Image (cartoon, rainbow, N blue to C red):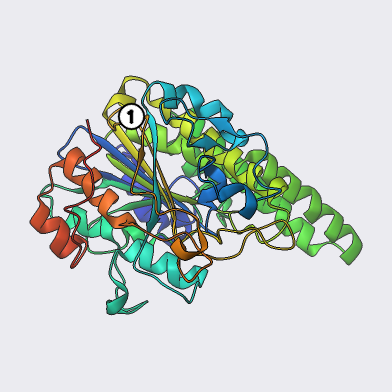
Amino acid sequence: MGKLLLTRRSFLSALGCSAAASPVIAPMAFASAPWDTRFVTIILRGAMDGLDVLRPIGDPHYNALRPTLNTGSLPLGGTGGFWALHPALATLMPMWDRGELGFAHATSTPYRDKRSHFDGQDLLEAGTGFDVGVGAVRDGWLNRMLQTVPGVEADTAFAIGRDDMLLLSGAAPVSNWSPGTRLDLSPQARRLLEMVYDEDPRYKAAVLEALDLTAAIDAAEAAPDDAGDMAMEAMMEGLNANQAHVQMADFAVDRLREDSRIAAFSLNGWDTHGNQQNQLPRALGALAEVLLLLRTGLGPIWQKTGVVVMTEFGRTAGENGTRGTDHGTGGLMIFAGGALKGGQVLGRWPGLAEADLYDRRDLMPTEDVRAYAARAMQGLFGVDETTLGGSIFPGLDFGGAPRFVL
């Protein structure tokens, strides 16, 4: 009888749909490509308040608009005292000082006025103009970029996380991974999985943990109501302790240190209508942890890496009656990485006087956020301007956007 050669590929083919549910192989997105540079895109879902994250304390109207949201600011060196960082990002100050962290303020997609999270996120990830129509395009700008590059393989790009990533959807091959996905494997399939990942203890442990977690969830759901509720509450505490954002960052590091060149994932928790002083620091703490994990984990590869952090739109210039902010227009893009020119705030500041605001309520956008994504891909991957303004971002004129890749 011939020797059975069990590989990851043959195992996944044999398991089919069951294997697709594995947290080791199901949504975060990655891709391999002919370049040596890396590109990470992080989508912040819920509309980050850019005016609280990067505070224009030098604007004479800021304090009046934000009477309770401007405490504890950390002035950014080299900005003449105009800009200050939210205190929850204090751990990123060394990255700013090293020129590995930067910002672009007063940015937006072409989306205006309706301020729907779902439509705003779709337009951000599709990378089109609003004239095309929300939902009319079902592939993302990062996938369209991959379609222009010869030799792209599935391991080139990874879409990471439970959320669908329109950003990387499309004809170009992309891999997906998600932490904490529920599994439904037979005992035989479980044993096969253990054998396949025998040489990868870290992945093996993650899969077995997910299997045990699934069994525990099933047991909690089958228990009587009171006992089931208590068991499910304990389960969710365990899931929160696992910190999905850390798992996603760790997985991104593992893949980007090998063949993958592109990773994309999203972070939730940015919709701060009330009690923003308590809610926003939690979200910012997770983002800071992700950026620091990427920097530390990638080691020397960090110097060849660019990270862009984008959100669907900004929030109102003034705080509301519940010490939060509502859906707005102009927002903030964050960028990091050793391959980018950090230590600077890009963009033309429009001012916060009432006459300078969009619709007299929001920060006025002065640059299309897609322009910065285009400049990043141009500098990191050598994509030409005609392609960037044509098939990748149809109709985009980014000639006025500064180049910020080293």
Vertical position of residue 12 compared to residue 135: above or below: above
- What residue is at 64 percent from the left and 52 percent from the top? 64
Taking the image as drawn, is residue 329 in sight? no
Q: Is 6 left, or right, of 323 in this rendering?
A: left
Which residue does the image show at 51% across and 73% down from the upper left?
Answer: 116
Q: Position of residue 353 (x, y in %)?
A: 50, 58
Q: In the displayed structure, would residue 71 be above or below residue 216? A: above
Q: Looking at the picture, tell me which residue is in the foreground, 299 or 199.
A: 299
Along the line of sight, the residue nearer the viewer: 154 or 379: 379
Q: Estimate how packed mark 1 is, as few (under 14), some (14 to 19) or many (20 or more) residues with alpha carbons within 10 Å.
A: some
Say above or below: 274 vs 234. below
The spot of residue 326 in percent (x, y) is: 60, 64
- The quarter of the image holding the C terminus is top left
| Quarter of the image where the N terminus is located | top left
Residue 146 point in image, percent of width and height: 20, 53
Residue sitting nearer the eye, 42 or 189:
42
Q: Which residue carries the number 1 mark?
A: 257
Q: Secondary structure at mark 1?
A: loop
| Residue name at image x 32 percent, y 62 percent | 169
x and y percent of residue 315 in the render? 54, 60
Residue 348 seen from this side: yes
Q: In the rendered picture of this protein, how many numbered marks are placed on residues?
A: 1
Q: What amino acid is labelled 1 in the image?
A: Arg
Residue 99 location, quadrant: top left
